[in-house]
Image: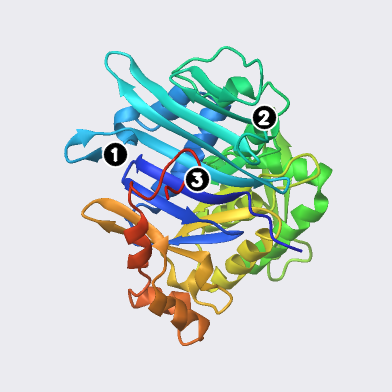
């Protein structure tokens, strides 16, 4: 079975520490680099798109500290920022792009926004500038505002609804064991929330609609945390929590522990596995992004985590950030699955790894993890050279000839 790839290419301009990047994504992508290199900013750009569509552009900016904290300042001067996502949806290529600019005394506005599904001029498409429609496949479009993404309003049209649904069904995770440990109110359980604050509802939902997925989660959890073999949702008055069953030496029956008694490592492992395998017959994420899934796990658990990532990527596109040599220390991690991330005078650079590292991995001279330990996983300088504003555009086909 061919692994699903939803987002095929990402172009970012002046997003936080990223001046410009133009990278391709596969079914499983490892963003590898030192702390502070800017790995999280790349993933956050995709999260920003999803959040701006499901809440509002204003809210997506505010939770990140406002426009001033999102757009990169170059040479001491603030700049516009833009995002372009190329995608494959139901076997048809398309792209969605927008650029946001500051407006004096008015906050911000969407300078330009473009969306197409299929060849431009043949499939559904539109181009909007400052709230005004310039081109569209549709004869009538809803009223648009220049401080909101047009796709939100246009998603009411049948032709564009699948694009909106797919972009808003991406999930991004930086899991918080403290929130997962606390008693939780019953919530929507189709999609795990970013910090795992609704994980009990997700586990309960999987119990009902996809028990096979829950068994996969439990199998990997037992590998990562020996003796823990089941996890279930239980009611505690009007609230709910998770109950773990664990084999204890000398005990005839498994002991039962609630989430408040479990370690950070166990809860994070469960959160990562739930994020990876949460797809079910009711709902399946189009892409999953996870920040440093190896955090709080023993290095010996890396093999199981790596296998889980690979298995999940057969059904859902996966992006992970990592600086763990143990996670990458295996021949199964291919060179084309790695994007190297470095910080150059405060500016994040992202690209596929350099030719020498690619050859070393392909020839099985070194694993990706061994190269990371040696400091040899670096972006390809020739690829970085091509990432210039003259060669990369957010709009009208992407590459300027």
Who is closer to the viewer here, 78 or 62?
Answer: 78
Specify which label sits upstream in the sequence, 1 or 2: 1
Would you name the residue on which mark 3 appears? 176
Specify which label sits upstream in the sequence, 3 or 2: 2
Query: Could you tell me if the residues under marks 1 and 2 are in contact, i.e. CB atoms within 8 Å?
Result: no
Would you name the residue on which mark 1 appears? 72
At label 2, counting other C-alpha atoms closer than 10 Å, the crowd grade (few under 14, some 14-19, many 20 or more) is many
Residue ID at (64%, 30%): 185
Side of 1 relative to 331 (left or right) = right
As drawn, the label of residue 160 is 2
At label 1, counting other C-alpha atoms closer than 10 Å, the crowd grade (few under 14, some 14-19, many 20 or more) is many
Who is closer to the viewer here, 327 or 221?
Answer: 327
| Residue 36 in sight here | no
Query: Whole-percent x and y of residue 280?
Result: 77, 46
Residue ID at (61%, 48%): 287
Q: CA distance from mark 3 to mark 1?
A: 28 Å
The answer to whether residue 20 is above or below residue 160 is below
Q: Residue furthest front?
A: 401
Q: How many marks?
A: 3
Q: Secondary structure under badge 1?
A: loop
| Residue 191 in sight here | yes
Residue ID at (71%, 29%): 159
Query: Whole-percent x and y of residue 3?
Result: 69, 60
Specify which label sits upstream in the sequence, 3 or 1: 1
Residue ID at (60%, 36%): 116
Query: Whole-percent x and y of residue 358?
Result: 45, 76
The answer to whether residue 186 is above or below residue 138 is below
């Amino acid at each position: 079975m061919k692994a699903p790839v939803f987002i095929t290419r990402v172009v970012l301009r002046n997003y936080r520490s990223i001046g410009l990047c133009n990278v391709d994504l596969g079914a499983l992508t490892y963003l590898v680099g030192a702390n502070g290199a800017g790995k999280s900013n790349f993933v956050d750009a995709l999260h920003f798109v999803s959040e701006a569509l499901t809440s509002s552009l204003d809210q997506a900016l505010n939770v990140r500290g406002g426009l001033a904290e999102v757009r990169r300042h170059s040479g001491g001067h603030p700049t516009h920022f833009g995002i372009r996502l190329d995608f494959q949806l139901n076997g048809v290529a398309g792209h969605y792009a927008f650029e946001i600019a500051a407006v004096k005394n008015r906050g911000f506005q969407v300078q330009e926004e473009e969306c197409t599904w299929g060849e431009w001029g043949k499939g559904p498409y539109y181009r909007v500038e400052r709230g005004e429609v310039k081109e569209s496949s549709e004869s009538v479009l809803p009223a648009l505002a220049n401080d909101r993404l047009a796709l939100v309003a246009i998603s009411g049209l049948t032709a564009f609804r699948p694009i909106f649904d797919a972009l808003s069904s991406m999930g991004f995770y930086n899991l918080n064991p403290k929130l997962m440990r606390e008693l939780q109110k019953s919530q929507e359980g189709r999609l795990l929330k970013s910090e795992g604050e609704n994980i009990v509802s997700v586990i309960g939902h999987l119990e009902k609609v996809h028990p096979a997925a829950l068994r996969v989660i439990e199998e990997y959890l037992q590998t990562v945390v020996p003796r823990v073999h089941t996890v279930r949702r239980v009611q505690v008055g009007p609230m709910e929590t998770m109950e773990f069953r664990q084999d204890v030496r000398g005990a005839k029956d498994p002991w039962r522990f609630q989430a408040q008694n479990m370690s950070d490592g166990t809860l994070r492992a469960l959160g990562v596995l739930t994020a990876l395998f949460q797809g079910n017959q009711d709902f399946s994420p189009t892409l999953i992004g996870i920040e440093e899934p190896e955090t709080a796990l023993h290095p010996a658990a890396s093999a199981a985590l790596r296998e889980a990532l690979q298995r999940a990527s057969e059904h859902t596109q996966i992006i992970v950030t990592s600086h763990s040599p143990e996670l990458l220390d295996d021949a199964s991690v291919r060179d084309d699955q790695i994007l190297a991330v470095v910080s150059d005078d405060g500016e994040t650079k992202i690209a596929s790894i350099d030719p020498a590292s690619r050859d070393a991995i392909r020839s099985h001279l070194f694993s990706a993890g061994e190269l990371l330990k040696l400091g040899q996983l670096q972006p390809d300088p020739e690829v970085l050279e091509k990432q210039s504003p003259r060669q990369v555009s957010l709009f009208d086909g992407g590459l300027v000839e």
